[in-house]
Image: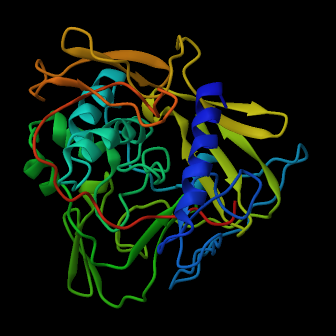
Amino acid sequence: MNAEKRERRIWLVGLVVAGAVVPGCFSYHSDDSGCDAHVVQTEGCLLCSCPEPAVAPSGPRHGVRPDGRVDVTAAEAWPDRPPRAIALTKEDIAEACAIYATCAFPKDDESLRTSTATWAEVACTEGATAPLTLSIADRGIPDPGKNESFEFLMRGILDGARDCDSIAALFTSNVTGLACQEDGCYTTEKHGALACEGDVAVVDGKRRDCSRSGMRCSVDSPTGCTDRPLTLCESPAKDRCDGDVKLGCDGCGFVSYHDCSWNGGRCVETPDGAECQDPADAPGCPAGSSTCTDGHFDLCVAGSPVTVNCAEIGAGECRDMPPLSTDGGSIYPGGFCTLGAPVTPPDGGTSDAGR
């Protein structure tokens, strides 16, 4: 973990602890706790639960290799993964995230909205659709409660969804009882009839367009699409790399999966396991964005600064986030674009249990 990410994680701990005194608690956990090392929203504070699929996962339980690492491959964890589309470039991610961040919060208070814009930028560049939520990009899962993958949303913005209403229209609600996290996707309710109409899954009469999450329809999948399934494993086991996919076995006994290459990153094995790291040739940069200079700012993506010119991408003007702390500093200080009126962001949330 680089210094910037470690500093960011420490700050999030403080913010989340403060949030524990209000309804709708958040809990934040380290890598060796009962949950994944990300923010988790639960009904009770500091609690995590394992996946409870309506259909029990089938297949073998993967063991532990002599080196203590989980004995599973990426292909075994996701046998029906569709061929990857052309990956998003760092420039694609920076442009789409700069536009998306301007519409990420339904705040009527302009000062509050501007103070949250750079938080949204940081979350987006890390593959999440809102601050204090998990990255859906490396997990290869759709947005919680929705049908869309991170890549689908970013492509939609790059292909013309350049105003807040158009961005909001990219999201469609999932009505088939789908739940996803780093362990995979599953259904929380048993289904009867399941059929495919092209890449549209018809589950008990309810429809889900699998292509919006980069999947195909499959009558052999409990979710109706070729989502990554729950895969059994023996815990504890160290994480390992299979190419640039980081695989693990969490405390719930399910294989965890993170594709480090979604933004050009890589998987690197360590004595204690494995971790996703920026590309080897990345020069490094502070999390978030730089301040505005002549209408543009630099946004840090996968360890590299990428210049965003708000006017050139049709996203209004460049504006700096005001300082938030009393000592004159700020959290994620920097520039952001002022596209237009904010809209309601995607609802819901997800947790990675068993870490």
Q: Quadrant of residue 271?
A: top right
**Residue 68 image position (x, y, % from top left):** 87, 48
Picture residue at 50% right of the left edge, 32% below the top? 261
Q: Is residue 224 above or below residue 166?
A: below
Q: Nearer the viewer, residue 334 or 61?
A: 334
Taking the image as drawn, is residue 243 in sight? Answer: no
Q: Say left or right for 104 vs 4.
A: left
Q: Nearer the viewer, residue 209 or 340?
A: 340
Outermost right residue: 66
**Residue 87 image position (x, y, % from top left):** 35, 31
Q: Nearer the viewer, residue 104 or 134?
A: 104
Picture residue at 68% right of the left edge, 65% below the top? 354
Q: Nearer the viewer, residue 14 or 192?
A: 14
Question: Split into 4 quadrants, where in the image is the N terminus?
Answer: top right
**Residue 159 image position (x, y, % from top left):** 12, 36
**Residue 312 image position (x, y, % from top left):** 11, 18
Q: How many marks?
A: 0
Taking the image as drawn, is residue 283 in sight? Answer: yes
Q: Is residue 26 above or below residue 175?
A: above
